[in-house]
Amino acid sequence: MKKNSRSFVAVTAAIGLVMLGVNYAPVANAAGTLTVSIGASVPLTGSLAKEGLLTKEGYQFCQTKVNAVSLFTIGGKSIKLDITYQDDTSKPDLAAQNLSKFNDKGMKLILSSYGSANVNAQAAVVELNKQTMVDSGGADDNIFNKGYTRTFNVMSPASEYASSMVKAINDLARPKPVKFAFLSADDGFSKTVTAGGIKTAKALGFTTMDPQYFPNATSDVSAALNKIKADKPDVIIGSVHFVEGVALIKQSKELGVQPQSFAETVAPPILEFASTLGPLAENVLGSSQWTSTTKGRDKYFGTAANYATEFAAAFGHEATYHNAEATAACLAMVMSIEKAKSIDADKVQAALKSLNTMSFFGTIHFDSTGQNSSKPMSVIQIQKGKIITVWPRISAQAKMIWPYAK
């Protein structure tokens, strides 16, 4: 058996142990190893539980891969990651409190929660405690305009989520649409997404209707749909998470609202979106932080295609961008520990500030605010029940289907 094959088998088997509940974390103070204790408060229950579980899977995959391959040492000792998880129940207050509990136990290195409200609350605590956090779940630009210096976001900013879909439609849609309607949850992240999308649409010459808002995590968006129905927009863009995203498609059908295209953030790249909606999901566009055709590679995960193959073998389902962005956050932490040759939070912070590398996730390079602002987003479309990359053209797996049709 070839060396790469042995490594793959070891990684797959180890992740299987994690999924079965077996403690795969390295033994503290084992001879020849240096244990890196990392805290991760993630939403395993509550409104963000679906995304939170995907985040945890991404962290687990990174831990197992890094521990299996041992590509660098500090002081002659191999690095072993030991990630401790706490459920923050999708609540910002608890997400922040959990980080203080980690700090009390001496855990200075942190992987973030999922959800911008959660990460926003965590960033303040990280700054106060002089912890260092890599963020995989809070993309709201507003987190990073407060002068924080210890939180680093591997994702493209929230302002790019809807903007990327507007750019893709402008580039690919023929005949080109005229009128855009933006429907949005009322949380900070979704509002930032909507503002970015409207700005881009106007700059490209499209007509934009006044945005309509509904409560975050609601399963009833009918009031917003009824407000735009008579104006017959060509494109409806939803700044949503999974629950609102499913409701938007279902209730549009029920109310007879049928634009040339639906485009949504967050929800379409989640595997259950297509399985939940069935035929109604067909041709819906979505913005994605990562796809299996993303350009770039690194020494731990190889290419995006390598990552997708190994992740699916380990977890029994396709990797979503939520999985990949979590793994990328963990990878950024590991690369910075390697660069710093230390697990001291201040030295890791300094290494993160200067990190500039390619990876299976694309570019990882933080600007002065801590955002990975140079990383572009992709646009996917549900085609025959599958998540297919359609933009940018260089990484497209198929042509975008236009217009939306049922």
Image: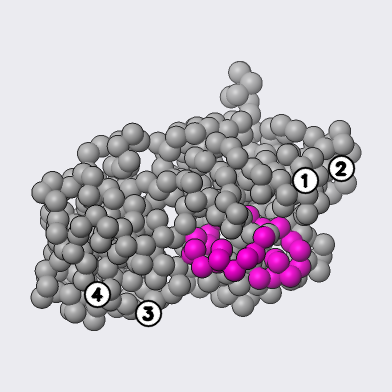
**What's the amino acid at mark 2?**
Ala
Secondary-structure class at tag 4: loop
Residue 52 in view (yes/no): no
**Could you say which quadrant of the image residue 261 lies in?**
bottom left
Report which residue position mark 1 lands on. 26
**What's the amino acid at mark 1?**
Pro
Q: Which residues are magenta?
A: 124-149
Report which residue position mark 4 lands on. 210
- Location of residue 137 in the rendering, given as x and y in whole percent from the top left corner: 53, 59
- On the rendered structure, is 306 left or right of 339? left
Secondary-structure class at tag 3: loop
**Could you say which quadrant of the image residue 215 lies in?**
bottom left
Q: Is residue 131 magenta?
A: yes
Report which residue position mark 2 lands on. 30
**What's the amino acid at mark 3?**
Pro
User: Which label's residue is closer to the chain start, 4 or 1?
Assistant: 1
Residue at 48% across / 46% down in the picture?
374
- Location of residue 128 in the rendering, given as x and y in whole percent from the top left corner: 74, 70
Marks 2 and 1, Cα distance to the nearest angstrom? 8 Å
Quarter in which the C terminus is drawn = bottom left
Residue at 19% across / 79% down in the picture?
227
Circles 2 and 3, Cβ within 8 Å, touching? The answer is: no
Marks 3 and 4, Cα distance to the nearest angstrom? 17 Å
User: Which label's residue is closer to the chain start, 2 or 4?
Assistant: 2
Q: Is residue 291 magenta?
A: no
